Image (tube, helix red, strand yellow):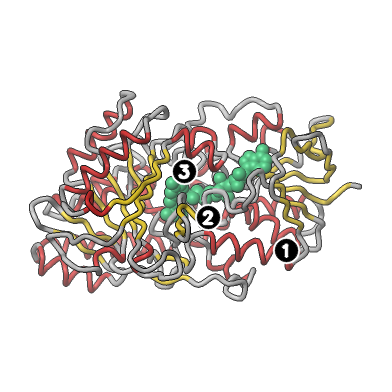
Amino acid sequence: MTRDAVVIGGGHNGLVAAAYLARAGLQVEVLERRDIVGGACVTEELWPGVRASPGAYTLSLLRAEIVRDLDLRRHGLHVEVHEPYLFAPFPDGRKVVTWSDRARTCEQLERDWSRADADGYRDFAARWSEAARRARPLMLEPPDRERWLDAVGPGILDGAIADELAGIPSEQVRVPLAIQGLIGTLAGPSDPGTAFVGFYHELGEAAGPPGAWGYARGGMGAVTAALRSAAEAAGARVRVESPVERVLVEDGRAVGVVVEGGEELRARAVLSNADPLRTARLAGVPEPDGWRQSGPVVKVMLLLDGLPDFPSWPGREPWRGAIDIGYSLADLEAAAADARAGRPARRPWIEAACQTATDDSLAPPGRHVVSLFCQCFPADADAGAAADAAVARLAEACPGLPDRIVDRLALGPRELEERFGIAGGHIFHGEMLPGQVLEQRCEARGFGRVERLYLCGSGAHPGGAVTGAPGYLAARAALSDLGRE
Ligand SMILES: Cc1cc2nc3c(=O)[nH]c(=O)nc-3n(C[C@H](O)[C@H](O)[C@H](O)COP(=O)(O)OP(=O)(O)OC[C@H]3O[C@@H](n4cnc5c(N)ncnc54)[C@H](O)[C@@H]3O)c2cc1C
């Protein structure tokens, strides 16, 4: 029997692709290696009765069109904006707070810093919001550098985040905004391409107001549970514990896959949600030339017996948003330089998040989970040592933290690779710096010059994070090739 399509991997993009293919009437089978779907977008029971998201933790970039088309709300997805947007506490007792509402952020900055900082932020935010409005429709279009350049201009597309923020006088105000440009890179704020990484994080529309970030009730696994439900409702078959061993290629065309154990599934199209390096291995083709996929992140999950106070903002409210620890632009540059030299950052930067502060469905009363997204580390980082360094760093602004820790789980690049099946443990299946975005990001169609093999994961345009866009674009390409547009 020949199916219309098989999808290797049930990450969020594989599920999006499967849902669109099935909705078009195709017979689709998703094969996931783990015993759960979701890839890096999951909720797992990390301690008895305590569920949390060890991969992605906050949602914004999932395309509104996908949420609508697949009716994800009906399939159980409920997203709430997290406020504050960003909270950056400093060891000197000062703080930077931003909100999803720009006007509220300006008022806050004027109160806590100066009128000039509020004005600088207002100009920066207005410029980026306008560019984001023009760029959002391009997220569901095949790569086209010229159109992106027209929409956002050369500074955002190729420049450094430090330059984009130069109009904000106080360095400390610039720090949490600069961090957004460094995600998934071994770059510092002065490096080219970091403006685009930051800007990409502004392109969201899933949490409500444009650019806002939010929590999916029940953790990030709620996103992929809704996608699975939508795909199955449309007729797709989803199989877990089914690792694909190789892609069957005959006369330069993908004709199916072999599952570990030898089962052969033939199909008219093969979509791979695995990263580019793993997909190349499965298909027996060369890796994409020069592709950089070495993960710089250590993710630490802390189980706490209560939420400590930040001296700069006591109480629970600061725990409701993303908490950015960087302290100075020089520290951010030094962290990247350390990791590029193969050393763990002595002063890593961190984005912390605590969904249990707003979602009581995840842990029993009195228990909280704080996740620490920590950069910059080399691929062979000792995750335990990195966790120690990160906790010490956060404790400079939150001295009560260490005494609240009951247990922890530390996932370095090697552990992320093992858990999520991403070669090198790279959060985006590859850096999103120049050379690996837009025209250079992997083409969905004809991966490795194999006909009817489509890359449908984050290594394909437009890139990483929970967007659904690569899955959508690969499904569209496959549908057109199969004559089902
Ligand atoms: C620690 C961390 C934090 C992050 N934080 C955020 C965040 O807060 N917000 C955000 O938007 N993004 C975040 N990201 C990025 C985001 O999670 C990823 O870019 C996204 O989830 C990738 O989705 P995907 O579907 O492309 O691939 P994946 O999620 O990697 O899914 C690929 C799937 O393929 C499966 N697979 C691989 N090989 C095989 C095989 N041979 N056979 C069968 N199955 C196979 C894997 O098991 C996996 O399920 C984070 C990522 C990490 C790791």
Q: Residue furthest right?
A: 1
Label 2 sits on residue: 42
Sequence-first tag of 2 and 3:
2
* Disc 2 to disc 3, C-alpha distance: 13 Å
Residues tagged 1 and 2 counted as in contact (Cβ below 8 A): no
Residue visible at 72% across and 55% down in the picture: 238
Q: In this view of the protein, which residue sits in the foreground, 82 or 317?
A: 317
Three-letter amino acid code of the residue under disc 2: Val
Residue visible at 53% across and 36% down in the picture: 418
Seen in the image, is 383 located left or right of residue 474?
left
> x, y (%) of residue 241?
69, 45
Report the number of discs.
Answer: 3
Residue visible at 59% across and 70% down in the picture: 72
Label 1 sits on residue: 232
Residue 6, relative to residue 216: is it above or below?
above
Q: In this view of the protein, which residue sits in the foreground, 355 or 184?
A: 355
At numbered mark 2, what does the secondary structure look like: helix, strand or loop? loop
